[in-house]
Image: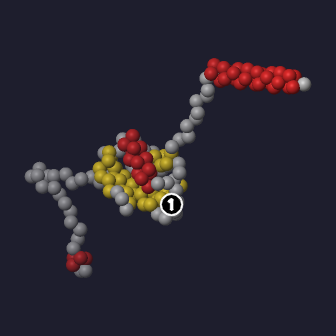
Amino acid sequence: MRKALIITVALIVLVAVAGCSSLQKDKKSSPAPAPQQEPLGSYHEFEDVLIPKEMELDTKSSFVFETPQYKTGILVYEGRVEAVSLSNFIEKNMVQDNWRMRSKIKYNRTILVFEKPDRDCIVNIEDATFKTVLEVIVAPRLETAQPEAGGNAIIQAPPAEENLAQ
């Protein structure tokens, strides 16, 4: 009886090992489908400012003004992300979207300033108690005053207050 039990257990182990080895061969012979990567973020109102997928638009605090010539505004997002990783994400992707970094202020809050030939973008990141707040401000670049033939720039000063009282 004992001999029959040992032979039965040995046969079960042999079948199991043979089955597993054939599964391994099948896995190796057929290429595994490439895992689909989720997008890291998306473009919202501004087609060249990528926002991480973890950030949610706060429509009550946001404002966008659009004309045929340009789009400007302030977009406010909130999410549960680390401020440092958010700053790194924004910095990396803005450069990839052909923005040029002009300056960076960091620690208590992070402020990143970017430019393109026709507009500027200021990114403000604040680490609040239970969330991180991201503000994206995009504005068209104002025309700079062109110097006259004599070399002096034309600068128009605002009217003085005493002239307004008349």
Q: Is residue 43 left or right of residue 152?
A: right
Q: Using the image, determine if residue 115 lies above or below residue 17.
A: below
Disc 1 is placed on an element classified as loop
Q: In which quadrant of the rendered image does the N terminus lie?
A: top right
Q: Is residue 26 left or right of residue 122?
A: right
Q: Using the image, determine if residue 142 lies above or below residue 17.
A: below
| Residue at 56% from the left image edge and 40% from the top image edge | 38
| Residue at 16% from the left image edge and 52% from the top image edge | 147
Q: Using the image, determine if residue 145 lies above or below residue 157.
A: above
Give the residue at mark 1. Answer: 131
Q: Is residue 119 left or right of residue 166?
A: right
For residue 49, say whether it is visible: no
Residue 31 position by quadrant: top right
Check the image and name the residue furthest to the right: 1
> Horizontal and vertical percent for residue 115?
32, 48
> Horizontal and vertical percent for residue 121?
36, 52
Q: Which colour scheme is used?
A: secondary structure
Check the image and name the residue furthest to the front: 2
Query: Between residues 54 and 18, which one lies in front from this camera angle?
Result: 18
Check the image and name the residue furthest to the bottom: 166
| Residue at 14% from the left image edge and 52% from the top image edge | 148
Query: Between residues 75 and 67, which one lies in front from this camera angle?
Result: 75
> Horizontal and vertical percent for residue 83?
44, 55
> Horizontal and vertical percent for residue 67?
42, 52
